Image: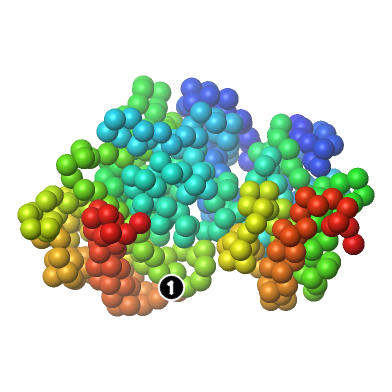
Amino acid sequence: MKLTLTVNGTEYSRTIEPRLLLIHFLRDELGLTGSHWGCDTSNCGACVVWLDETPVKSCTVLAAMTDGRRVTTVEGLARGGVLDPVQQGFAACHGLQCGFCTPGMMMTARWLLDRNPDPTAADVREAISGQICRCTGYENIVRSVLWAAAHDGSDGDARL
Amino acid sequence: MQVPAHVDYEKATSVQHALALLARYGPEAKVLAGGHSLIPMMKLRLAQPEVLVDINGLTDLCYISRTADMLRIGTLTRHAQLLESDLAGEHFAIMHDAERVIADPIVRNWGTVGGSLCQADPSEDLSAAFAAMKGTMVIQGPDGSREVSARAFHTGPYETVVGPSELLTEIRLPIRPGRLRGGSGYLKVARRAGDWPVGAAGAAVWLADAGGGKHSIADVGIGLTAVGATHFVAAEAEEFLRGRPADEESLARAGAIAAEHCRPVTDQRGPADYKRHLVQELTTRVLRVAISRARGLAS
């Protein structure tokens, strides 16, 4: 089937098999390997990308389902060469160790902050409760997201 | 690596179009809503439909609205929408209680209410919640629509009354007249955050004034999941409670009756006798929550 969608602002058209999962389409067809393919069972959240305005687990979404929609991956977080405050927060607060869960964590964090600009630590924990950091680095992930909340919308001030 | 088997794909553009596609392809077609049950089953090759009929474009099936005596929920309503709906929570707190413990926030963004119900997993939470609320399912087919009680919707594990050329389109929940005080709740025990329940109980109660600041139970619905309750209902406990005082003694007895009549099995989530114990305790506790809310003593 023919699939046409917009990924990180760029329109792509490809002929795909309907059974192709979104995570494999992004990684193997488009070469966007920022999104990680982890548990394959919608438990770990390493594959979280945005479908239109909401994060989804792309190992459990068919690429076919995104026809005519917008997908945003971690590669689309930075704007004009400036890292998103969430990305800066992860760098500033040592929010990653091995980095495998990081793209999914950051996509969920951006979504949280867009909806709730001033979250508590408990709000952050709830938001990432469907995602696993196998390094168990949750404390620093929560700190990173709170750092981003504190620096969000402050433009230049957020730059490292 | 888990990959679904070869499958064809059709995108429905309206309910009528979806029904026409289902009629054309017959029993080998599967409706694809959020896909958070179906796609994992396809990846494990437990499901191998020949055609998927994608209904995600039917956004007119995403709604929560109320009429005078009824709350209406569209089948494609995402779990997150139900959790965030003030209207749903105002009338039936049980739905917010249940949604809060279904999977995780990301899965809830895309998984749908109708998809969960039609998957008919014997451990599914909303099936018990809608049974407790005595909901009605609206099913559309080639010859028009029909209504089925939430308590007659499931015909067995992973099986419902929805035929191969039919579509569940709406769930209706009755809103009782104001002279009865209504309250509801849902309690679940799971091994870890976002997991399927070891056992869970939901209750919806309607209280009548019994004088002297006391209340009797005018009507009650009790839903149980993951514990082998027929149609997700604790019918014997409901029968016992109807007309009784809304007091601790009644609730304790109702819990014991619910435990006696369910049929849990020992599996990786726990031994049968533990699940039976859970049913007793959760039924009593969730009735307590529902009654407190009906009395306006808890939110």
- Tell me the residue at 49%/40% (across/down): B77
Graded by Cα atoms within 10 Å as few (under 14), some (14 to 19) or many (20 or more), the crowding at tag 1 reads: some
- Tell me the residue at 71%/31% (across/down): A68
- Tell me the residue at 52%/63% (across/down): B194
Q: In which chain is the residue bearing label 1?
A: B
Q: Element under label 1? A: loop
- Residue B179 falls in which quadrant of the image? top left
Residue B19 against residue B193 in the figure, above or below: above
- Identify the image's colour scheme: rainbow, by chain, secondary structure or one colour: rainbow
The answer to whether one can see residue A5 in this image is yes
The answer to whether one can see residue B115 in this image is no
Q: Quadrant of the C terminus of chain A?
A: bottom right
Q: Horizontally, is A123 left or right of A32 in the view?
A: left
Residue B88 against residue B142 in the figure, above or below: below
- Tell me the residue at 40%/57% (across/down): B97
Q: Position of residue B183 (x, y in %)?
A: 27, 52
Q: Quadrant of the N terminus of chain A?
A: top right
Q: Which residue is mark 1?
A: B269
Q: Horizontally, is B221 left or right of A57 in the view?
A: left
